[in-house]
């Protein structure tokens, strides 16, 4: 459990998610207020809590916020964690490029527990490091927008002819098991 001076800053961008609050947790609700709080309030961890179902403009704002936090001399050394509702390889790759340290999928769609996240980083942070997360996600996952809130996920190893979802997506494509997938192992050659 963090000390009294410890602050965890949570940028809550998904209104549907409850943040477990305590005296050492500060919550903001948009990227600009998060950046302001991060540069004016001492904190030991910054959590970006958002939905992968967010629209394109919010995704860009989140990526830009992550980039600003990692280049600012006041915040660049503070661990940055993305708490998400589902995996998305393309967004994870963008976040990694701009300096995100850790990423984890919420066990519950409606609740984020900053104390648990802090403990997780302190005890077993290796498994949630962004590089480890990227290694678990198949590099052939492709996302085609359908509308502002949904995307079609397809397998690029087979020219996006196979739509992914459900058990296959969660148990194979979004885990290390993708390394043994028959489509991953037998990709259609590009001409």
Image (cartoon, rainbow, N blue to C red):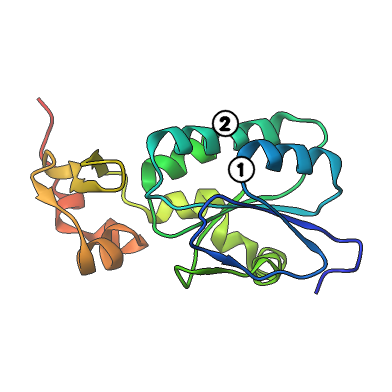
In what element is the residue under mark 1?
Answer: loop
Residue nearest the viewer, comparing 8 with 23:
23
User: Which of the two labelled residues, at mark 1 and mark 2, occupies the earlier sequence position?
Assistant: 1
Write down the quadrant of residue 3 in the picture.
bottom right
Write down the quadrant of residue 83 in the picture.
bottom right
Q: Which mark is residue 30?
A: 1
Q: Position of residue 159 (x, y in %)?
A: 11, 38
In what element is the residue under mark 2?
Answer: helix
The residue located at (48%, 69%) in the rendering is 110
Q: Is residue 167 visible in this depiction of the protein?
A: yes
Would you place residue 159 above or below residue 121 in this image?
above
Would you place residue 55 above or below residue 13 in this image?
above
**Of circles 1 and 2, which is in front?**
1
The residue located at (61%, 35%) in the rendering is 65
Q: Which mark is residue 64?
A: 2
Quarter the C terminus occupies: top left
Q: Position of residue 114 (x, y in %)?
A: 67, 66
Crowd rating for badge 1 (residues with CA inside 10 Å; few <14, some 14–19, many 20+):
some
Q: Is residue 173 left or right of residue 37?
A: left
Residue nearest the viewer, comparing 104 with 53:
53
Q: Is residue 16 left or right of residue 119?
A: left
The residue located at (71%, 69%) in the rendering is 21
Residue nearest the viewer, comparing 71 with 184:
71
Q: Is residue 160 left or right of residue 51?
A: left
Q: Is residue 99 visible in this depiction of the protein?
A: no
């Amino acid at each position: 459990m963090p000390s009294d001076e410890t602050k965890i800053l949570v940028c809550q961008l998904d209104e549907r998610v409850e943040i477990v609050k305590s005296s050492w947790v500060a919550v903001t609700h948009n990227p600009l207020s998060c950046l302001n709080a991060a540069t004016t309030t001492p904190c030991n961890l910054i959590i970006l809590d958002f939905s992968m179902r967010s629209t394109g403009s919010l995704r860009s704002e989140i990526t830009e916020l992550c980039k600003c936090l990692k280049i600012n001399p006041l915040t660049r050394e503070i661990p940055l964690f993305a708490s998400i509702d589902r995996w998305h390889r393309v967004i994870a790759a963008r976040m990694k490029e701009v300096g995100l340290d850790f990423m984890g999928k919420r066990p519950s769609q409606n609740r984020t527990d900053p104390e648990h996240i802090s403990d997780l980083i302190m005890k077993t942070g290796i498994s949630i490091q962004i590089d480890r997360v990227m290694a678990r996600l198949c590099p052939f996952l492709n996302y085609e927008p359908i509308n502002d809130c949904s995307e079609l996920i397809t397998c690029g190893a087979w020219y996006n002819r196979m739509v992914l979802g459900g058990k296959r997506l969660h148990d194979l494509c979004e885990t290390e098991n993708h390394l043994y997938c028959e489509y991953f192992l037998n990709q259609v050659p590009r001409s």
